[in-house]
Amino acid sequence: MTARVEVPVRGGGIRLGQFLKLTNAVDQGSDVKVLMAAGEVVVNGELEVRRGRQLTEGDVVAFGGTEYVVGLG
């Protein structure tokens, strides 16, 4: 079973790289690029390779066995 965590963000949107740092999935922004190149980040069921992708409320980011849902902050 996959864990699911809601992560509140302000302003209704956030870039994927910033979101992964917010969830503590990575320590630095440069780590995001490495994870994406390895095919470890999925957004709404699709492999994602753009760390600048804009996420909005309800988007689901899967990484490391956990699903993170973008929520309102």
Image (cartoon, rainbow, N blue to C red):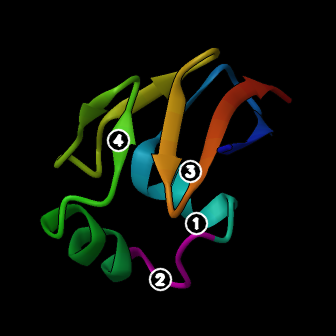
Q: Amino acid at mark 1?
A: Lys
Cα separation between marks 2 and 1: 7 Å
Rendered position, 5 above or below 24: above
Give the amino acid type for the residue marked by disc 4 in the picture. Val
Label total for image? 4
The three-letter code of the residue at mark 2 reads Gln
Residue 63 is covered by the magenta coloring: no
- Magenta stretch: dominant secondary structure: loop
Comes first in the chain, label 4 or label 3? 3
Horizontal side of 64 relative to 32 (left or right) equals: right
Q: Position of residue 38 (x, y in %)?
A: 17, 70
Please name the residue that numbered disc 4 is placed on: 42
Q: CA distance from mark 4 to mark 3?
A: 13 Å
- Which SS class for mark 2? loop
**Residue occupied by mark 1:** 21
Of circles 2 and 4, the one toward us is: 4
Q: Which mark is residue 19?
A: 3
Does 42 sit left or right of 10 as displayed? left
